[in-house]
Image: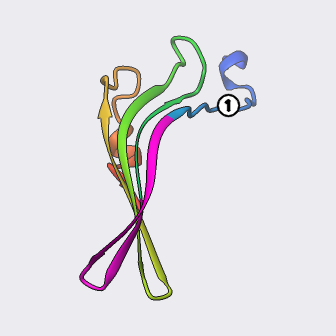
Amino acid sequence: MSNSEESSPFRETNYEPQLFLGFATDYHFAGWTLRDVEMGYNHNSNGRSDPTSRSWNRLYTRLMAQNGNWLMEVKPWYVVGGTGDNPDITKIYGLLSA
């Protein structure tokens, strides 16, 4: 028999509030110009209660650099507060986005 409550179609809802500080810059290095820096705290949650709750918190720095017409952005992060209800989160999302 199937569990119709857990197997039925669902609507996914995710929440991602964050607090950050960003600033523009004009720092030159190896032909690139660092244009934008952002540092912040990010919380990601599905908004559900146990046992289906999934959430994680991270500190991040986002850097945007320019070289001519090329723009590059990298956002490494560090998971804080543990991942008890989401132990594989860094395997799924890694430790940065680019």
Residue 81, quarter of the rendered image: top left
- Is residue 20 rendered magenta in the image? yes
Residue furthest bottom as drawn:
68
Q: Position of residue 33 (x, y in %)?
A: 36, 76
Three-letter amino acid code at the position of disc 1: Thr
Residue 90 visible here = yes
Q: Is residue 41 above or below residue 39?
A: above
* Residue 39 x, y percent position in the rendering: 38, 45
In front of the other: 48 or 1: 48
Quadrant of the image containing the C terminus: bottom left
Q: Is residue 62 above or below residue 70?
A: above
What residue is shown at x 40% (from left), y 30% (from top)? 57
Q: Give the residues drawn in magenta, as a range.
A: 19-36
Q: Position of residue 74 (x, y in %)?
A: 38, 61
Judging by the rendered image, the residue that carries numbered circle 1 is: 13
The x, y position of residue 65, in whole percent, is 40, 72
Overall secondary structure of the magenta stretch?
A: strand
Label 1 sits on a secondary structure element that is loop
